[in-house]
Every structure is written in C-alpha cells, then in structure tokens.
Amino acid sequence: MTYDRFVLLDADQARPGRVPLPPAFAVKATTADTEGRFSLLEVVLGQPIPRHTHHLADESIYVLEGELQVTIGDRTHLLGPGQFTLLPRGTPHALRPGVGGPPRVLQISSPGGWECFVEDMIEAGPRLMVDGRLDPARLNQIAGRHGITYVEDARHGQEARP
C-alpha cells in the first residue's frame, strides 16, 4: 500500500491552494490529491449562485447544516441536513440559501477542478459583482476556462424563493 497521496485533515483544516480562500470555502481534497478524479470542498453558501451549467463535471452536494434551494428547470427543491443532490454535467441549475441563513454543504466535482474556478473567482474579487450579487456575464469571463457557463438573462439568474 502506498501513502504518497494520503491526506488527513482536522475539522478546521483545509488544503492549501494557489490563493488563500475565505473561510466560506474549505478545500478538503484538491484535484491534484485525487489525480483529477474529483475535488471536495466544504462550502458555506452565503449568496445565490445564478443559473449555470457545468459542461465537464458532475456536481454533487450534500447538505450538512441549514437549507439549500436547488432550482432545475422550473422546479425548486428545498434540501435540508442529510439530503443530497447529483447535478449531472449539462444540467442547468441555480443554488441559493434557504430562509434560515447560509447552509453549510459538501460539494464534490467529478472530475475535479472546481477549486481552481473558486480560486479564480476569489482573485477576480468584487469585479464579478453587480449590486452586491454575482453577475453572470462577469462570471463567464473566467468560467469558460473551467467548462462552466452562466445564463446571462437576468430573469433566469435570480429565481424566486418557493
């Protein structure tokens, strides 16, 4: 048995990356750790994520705390602690915190790479925002490099709460 890729993290630890990430993003397994198979992040979703599509990766989300709204098509699903969703690549979706505040989730991307997009977003900083929200057109300036497309029609980016 080989231990060259063995990783063990304490509850408050995260894997280092190219840039420091805010506490809302804790990378637990990088794409490099898994030889590209997946990446795993613990995320506190503090704001809505506009409708987007992952063209290369399946996205899985497991809710640890709080409520997460997942919109696919014209349906919004409310997920609570212990619930899981698989968002297959090519499936347009939007995410937003539920009414109880920001949910804490585990997010798995397969193949990996999502942590690299998060690092690029953090580097871009406030220029990705308009009126305090992530702007799909501005996100697309970096998202394409990661196989992600955000819907730029504002009517689809800010779904109403159920």
Image (tube, rainbow, N blue to C red):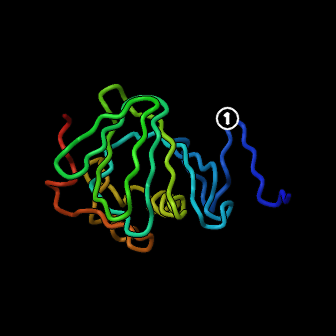
> Count the marks: how many?
1
In the drawing, does residue 162 fall left or right of residue 143? left
Q: Which residue lies furthest to the left in this view?
A: 155
Q: Residue furthest bottom?
A: 145
**How busy is the neighbourhood of tag 1: few (under 14 within 10 Å), some, or many (20 plus)?**
few
In the drawing, does residue 12 fall left or right of residue 100? right
Q: In which quarter of the image is residue 35?
A: bottom right
Q: Mark 1: which secondary structure? A: loop
The x and y percentages for residue 25 are: 53, 46
Q: Residue furthest front?
A: 1
The x and y percentages for residue 132 are: 30, 47
Q: What residue type is labelled 1?
A: Ala
Toward the viewer: 129 or 114?
Answer: 114
Toward the viewer: 79 or 48?
Answer: 79
Residue at image coords 60%, 50%: 27
The x and y percentages for residue 162 are: 19, 34
Q: Would you place residue 152 above or below residue 134 in this image?
A: below
Residue at image coords 20%, 44%: 75
Toward the viewer: 7 or 17?
Answer: 7
Q: Residue furthest top?
A: 100
Q: Which quarter shows the N terminus? A: bottom right
The x and y percentages for residue 65 are: 46, 29
Residue at image coords 53%, 64%: 111
Q: Which residue position holds label 1?
A: 11
Residue at image coords 34%, 25%: 100
Q: In which quarter of the image is residue 153?
A: bottom left
Q: Would you place residue 10 above or below residue 149 in this image?
A: above
